[in-house]
Image: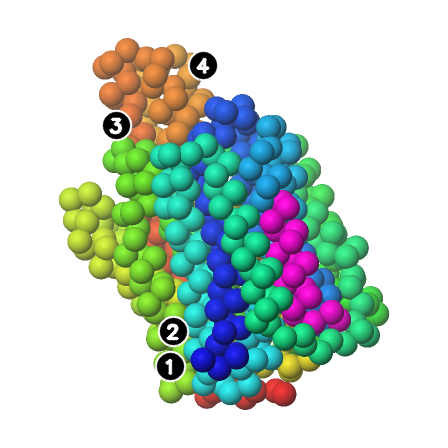
Amino acid sequence: MHNRWRILIVIIFIYLPVSLDATVLYVVAPILSVQLQATHNELLWIMDIYPLVMASLLIPMGTLGDRLGFKKLAVYGSAIFGVASLAAAFAWTPALLICARALLAAGAAMIVPATLAAVRKNFPNEKERNMALGIWTTIGTGGALAGPVVGGILLNSFYWGSVFLINIPVVLFVLFLLHKVVPNDKSSGHQSVNLSQSLLLMSALLLLIYSAKSLVHHDNSAIMSTYIFLTGAVLLGCFIVLQIVSRSRLIDTGLISQRNIIAGVVLAMTSMITLVGFELVISQELQFVHRFTPVQAGLYVMPLMLSCCLAGPLAGHLISRFGIKMVAVAGLAVSALSLYVLAGVDFVNHSWTAWAWMSLLGAGDTVALMASSSAIMTAAPVNKASSAGSIEGMSYELGTGLGITIFGSVIAGVYSSTVRLPDNLPPALSGPAGASFSEAIEVSRHLDEATRDTLLKAASSAFMHSHSITLESASLILTMLMILTFFIFEQGKAVSRD
């Protein structure tokens, strides 16, 4: 086996825990609310802090990787990830778990650009690089989709902290492999690492997403939510101004000025929003409406995961043969059609139909993600491979965080506006029951049998309607993106810029 393929195996082991941790808490959140007595806002931060902090730190960590070399960056990132996993597993308060998840994100933000830089530097041949990027994409999407299944299986036998403890042996094995298999790589010491602008971006993103969720879920008053949103918008505006006027910019304008890199970023972000958002929707429906257990719900989406895993390497061949543009457009077309059909499918009575279209959705979205990876990494010069990888990784993580926010907010908004609560429901319970399905279930436990059945039927109907509206809207967005992609991507195959 050639050394570069052994390095790719190491990359897979490094990246897998990072992708799993993005979604592993989907099935753990209800347990955290009981065992850690976490409030709704605390659960929100526990879930979202990982992708949002990671997205904000990826660019400066990518620059750091260009200075240190990808091997050192991978070693440091893996060590931090292991320590943070141990801290998260034994956190006894929501605040400690939030801090541990933020530290996890810092380690992950170092790992992602390191793995992509390793691919860029060890696979100079475009055809082989596309194959390697296809495998990398498969690990990212497959790991994120497998997170709830892994979490559900562990929760059947162990306590909730086990979802973090499984990272420890993997990290130790990775550090051993990095020492034995991966050679030292050249680095350049002239790039500056701008953490202040990264922290500014992080603050803006956290405030904007928190304000949106708190407004939909009525965690704060409308005035307070608006104030938080405006504060985040001002900070984001300051960040954009700094990227224009500052001599030391966080984002490499030479990279983002290239058409294929811009198109790749938008494509990656939207594809991840779709994948993560769909998994959130179907997980909630299967558990709330159809009473599936977390493990059953995770296993139900197995065809989606398998198609993602199989489509990644295949996408590399397709790009080498047909070019980035055609593969990206085809992947988006398949994904948009799949979402439109799934919006009207009965997941219980027509499970085979659902699995077939879920498989097509996974394949189409993975192909589109692979096209974005190839576009970004091929257009980037070798000496800026870590920076380009961090830009792509930021797109992935922003897509993950926004997928939870957008899909969750749309579902909650449509649900609250369409649910028809029982007339005899006490006023004190009407607010929570009309806010979300999960709160309606909690309210139903305090009602007589007849009122409880009426409420749950109304909540199920409203949730199913919100499910359809959300998936149809996502299908429309992907269709528009497909048209935009056709005109933005440069014609033909991307040319490697060595």
Q: Residues within 10 Å of mark 1 (few under 14, many from 20)?
A: some
Location of mark 2 (residue) = 313
Q: Secondary structure at mark 4?
A: helix
Quick one: SS at disc 3?
helix
Disc 4 residue type? Answer: Ala
Residue 317: numbered disc: 1
Q: CA distance from mark 1 to mark 2?
A: 7 Å
User: In this figure, which residue is indicated by the disc labeled 3?
Assistant: 457
- Determine the secondary structure under disc 1: helix
- Residue 391 makes an appearance in the image: no
Q: Amino acid at mark 2?
A: Pro
Q: Tell whether 125 sits left or right of 466.
A: right
- Image point (27%, 47%), residue name: 300
**Residue that label 4 marks:** 428
Asked whether 391 or 302 is in front, the reply is 302
Which percent across, then down, holds residue 41?
57, 32
**Disc 2 on helix, strand or loop?**
helix
Foreground label between 4 and 2: 2
Describe residue 276's horizontal placement relative to residue 58 as left or right: left
Q: Which badge, 3 or 4, is on the more N-terminal residue?
A: 4
Q: CA distance from mark 4 to mark 2?
A: 54 Å
Marking on residue 18: none
Amino acid bearing label 1: His
Number of numbered labels in the structure image? 4
Q: What is the three-letter code of the residue carrying label 3?
A: Lys
Do labels 3 and 2 touch, CB within 8 Å? no
Q: Which residues are magenta?
A: 67-84
Q: Earlier in the sequence, mark 1 or mark 4?
A: 1
Residue 92: x and y in percent read 59, 28
- Chief SS of the magenta region: helix
The answer to whether the residue labelled 3 contacts the one labelled 1, judged by CB atoms less than 8 Å apart, is: no
